[in-house]
Image (tube, rainbow, N blue to C red):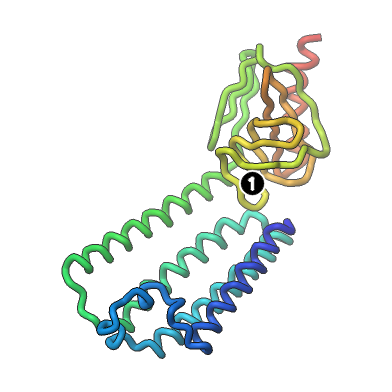
């Protein structure tokens, strides 16, 4: 929670500093594209209007990111992916609209390169948006005599014969790093390395307990839902199948 707010503050301060330097300090070298443009082409750019536009956009984007970070941290954690997506889209819009201050005529190769860049950026934004939305869908977990089937993003199958223990804990070890997974806000899914446990799988929707610990031969899986009652209900099903059922 506090990490998201700190990230918001860092982004806000950085954006405000850059915006002020460009708009008021006339540090035009900070404007990507313009700073590498030949001198003869720079003369055909309305740099004063461009700097004013870029500065205002950066101020707005910085304030938006900070507000989004605070709101998602304190009240609506599931909104943070949308904040990131809108922020990224805002940067893309800013760069695209900034082209109107450039009076230089583009050659056909330059126009084609710009079109390709726009298409790639839009496809990337759509892909990231789809991934973030898909990542918020609760993992479907099926318990059967053969094992545990986890569906959804980073889904897997845990064979019954590999399960060595199942427990319900109010806390979990510290996450040291994400090896191959999705992590934003409260969502942590995929392969992570935890302090004292090493590498395993996480399917978390909340940073608050309880947490279901499933230990297997040489690894582990930790699961929880945003609703604690739902987590506890799943644990009872797992305990009945793989703890009490073996006594």
Tell me which residue sits at (42%, 74%) in the image: 94
Tell me which residue sits at (76%, 23%) in the image: 166
Q: Eyeballing the image, is 192 above or below 241?
A: below
Q: Position of residue 149 (x, y in %)?
A: 59, 24
Name the one closer to the observer, 125 or 17.
Answer: 17
The image quarter containing residue 213 is top right
- Drawn side of residue 140 relative to residue 96, left or right: right
Name the one closer to the observer, 198 or 8.
Answer: 198
Image quarter hosting the C terminus: top right
Name the one closer to the observer, 25 or 164.
Answer: 25
Tell me if I can see residue 98 in this picture. yes
- Drawn side of residue 46 relative to residue 197, left or right: left
User: Of all residues shown, which one is farthest toward the left?
Assistant: 108
Q: Position of residue 210 (x, y in %)?
A: 79, 38
Rate crowding at label 1 as few (under 14), some (14 to 19) or many (20 or more) other CA atoms within 10 Å. many
The image quarter containing residue 146 is top right
Q: Eyeballing the image, is 49 above or below 243?
A: below
Q: Eyeballing the image, is 100 above or below 145?
A: below
The image quarter containing residue 223 is top right
Tell me if I can see residue 97 in this picture. no
Q: How many marks?
A: 1
Q: Position of residue 204 (x, y in %)?
A: 67, 40
User: Of all residues shown, which one is farthest toward the front?
Assistant: 39
Name the one closer to the observer, 207 or 95.
Answer: 95
Tell me which residue sits at (24%, 81%) in the image: 104
- Residue under numbered circle 1: 187
- Drawn side of residue 32 relative to residue 197, left or right: left
Image quarter hosting the N terminus: bottom right
Tell me which residue sits at (69%, 65%) in the image: 70
Q: Position of residue 159 (x, y in %)?
A: 61, 16
Say which element carries label 1. strand
């Amino acid at each position: 929670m506090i990490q998201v707010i700190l990230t918001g503050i860092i982004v806000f301060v950085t954006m405000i500093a850059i915006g002020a330097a460009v708009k008021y300090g006339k540090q035009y070298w900070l404007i990507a594209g313009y700073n590498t443009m030949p001198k003869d082409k720079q003369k055909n750019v309305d740099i004063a209007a461009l700097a004013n536009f870029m500065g205002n956009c950066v101020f707005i984007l910085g304030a938006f990111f900070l507000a989004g970070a605070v709101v998602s941290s304190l009240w609506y954690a599931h909104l943070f992916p949308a904040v990131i997506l809108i922020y990224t889209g805002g940067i893309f819009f800013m760069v695209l609209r900034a082209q109107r201050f450039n009076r230089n005529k583009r050659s056909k190769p330059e126009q084609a390169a710009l079109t390709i860049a726009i298409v790639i950026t839009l496809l990337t934004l759509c892909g990231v948006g789809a991934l973030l939305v898909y990542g918020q869908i609760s993992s479907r977990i099926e318990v059967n005599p053969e094992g545990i089937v986890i569906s959804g993003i980073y889904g897997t199958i845990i064979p019954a014969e590999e399960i060595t223990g199942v427990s319900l804990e109010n806390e979990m070890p510290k996450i040291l790093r994400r090896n191959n997974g999705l992590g934003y806000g409260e969502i942590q899914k995929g392969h992570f390395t935890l302090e004292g446990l090493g590498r395993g799988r996480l399917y978390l929707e909340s940073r608050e307990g309880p947490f279901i610990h499933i230990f297997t031969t040489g690894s582990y899986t930790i699961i929880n839902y945003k609703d604690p009652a739902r987590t506890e209900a799943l644990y009872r099903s797992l305990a009945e199948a793989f703890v009490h059922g073996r006594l």
